[in-house]
Image (cartoon, grey):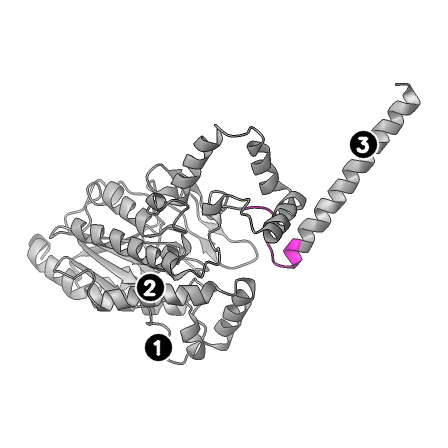
Amino acid sequence: MNFKNYKKFIFSLIAILLIFICLEIITKVTLILLKKPSVFKTLIDDPEHSGYDFLTGHYNYPFKKKNIEKNTNFIEQATDRYGFNLDGKRMYDKDLSKKDQCEFRIFLLGGSTVQGRAIKDTNDPISARLESQLKNLNKNISFKVYNAGTSSFFSQQELMLVQNRILYALKPEQIIILNGSNDFIIPIGKDIYLSNSHNYQRYFQNQFIKQDNNFFIYFDTFLSKNLSIYFLTKKIVEKASKIKLFYKDQSILEEISDKTYHQKKVMRYFYNTNILKKLSSNKTNIDIFFQPTMLPENLKNLSEQDIEIFKEHRKLQPEYFQNKEYFYNLIRKKIKDNMIKSNEFFKIHDISDLINNKKMTLPLFSDHVHYNSISRQIIAEKIYVEIKNKVDKKIKTEFNNCF
């Protein structure tokens, strides 16, 4: 190849590369403007998930510093050595294997609604609000409510966290779990025996299986997660052929209307709840609160701002709210029918209509799932009312030396 031909080759190569880059930018910008994903994302790639724990999957990194979210006045909490969020007065790390004699220790678990989204300060999360109320119960007791909420956690991960991290080692008097919404979102899985696993476990297993498959699968994964042109082409082929090309379990918000599918999610929720009941004891009481959420049945009672949030999300995923309402109604019925009976150490509370049972002029949601300061206070007050007698009884029987 002479010098002139070499220059033509390099020029052609650069021109093709520039054309490809322009097409990639146009595709990515167009998808973003249409409010569509521009590359394939899974829970594994979600930036909300900061770390990995071999038992619970994604979890919060320990010793994370407090951060102000971009373009907002909201904060992202710091964490202690365990990955628990530092809220309220607890703005320092502490070795929780050591416990003060008069400390009444409570762990609050759940997803991002418990962890806190769109929070103004460290006193805004439900955990800090609950701790503030408990201090009025008895001045001689040091009430500590530890925020163990983690984005996208569902009942199986909460069970693993309680059983393998908190219950034995950290000696709580009370465990509170606010959940339900993520149990609807997290899919059952391709195989029913994987139903009670979290997405990282399924993803991890899938990577091992892939090792026995075609080597080009690795290129496919890389391109799907990085190039909008490639991603869009696969989605178009999926729509046209109705063949699922992406890893099925990771389609977290897949619009499945099959009622049997959602019934399986309900059974999974109560399966984990029943195990949590068996873990409760006179040493550690466990209360589960089936959480409020935005549903079509509540639309007439929502504020104008919340109605706009509802309508905007429904445009993106038309069947989301309908399916979620079906799931919620099944859970409610089974709680009402005492599918899992309460005892002196355990109770499941249905508070799903707590913030939507009357006409509201003020907004209660920061998006279609997460609460704002008003609803967080309402929920904290309700939890306090439901557990205060149980807490007071434990104080009188087990904290006599503190008086």
Q: Left or right: 302 with respect to 142?
A: right
Q: Left or right: 38 with respect to 9?
A: left
The numbered disc on residue 291 is 2
Residue numbers of the magenta segment: 31-40
Front residue (pair 108, 191): 191
The quarter of the image holding the N terminus is top right
Pick whichever of labels 2 and 3 is earlier in the sequence. Answer: 3
Q: Is residue 361 visible?
A: no
Disc 1 marks a residue whose amino acid type is Asn
The numbered disc on residue 357 is 1
Residue 175 in picture, x, y percent from top left: 23, 54
Residue 388 in picture, x, y percent from top left: 18, 65
Q: Left or right: 393 with respect to 359?
A: left
Q: Which residue is mark 3?
A: 13
Q: Quadrant of residue 126?
A: bottom left
Q: Disc 3 or disc 1, which is closer to the eye? A: 3
- The residue positioned 48% from the left and 32% from the top of the image is 210
In three-dimensional space, the C-alpha distance between marks 1 and 2, rounded to whole angstroms, equals 13 Å
Residue 368 in picture, x, y percent from top left: 47, 64
Residue 227 colored magenta?
no
Disc 2 marks a residue whose amino acid type is Gln
Pick whichever of labels 3 and 1 is earlier in the sequence. Answer: 3
In three-dimensional space, the C-alpha distance between marks 3 and 1, rounded to whole angstroms, equals 64 Å
Residue at the top extreme, as displayed: 1
Q: Tell me the SS state at disc 1.
A: loop
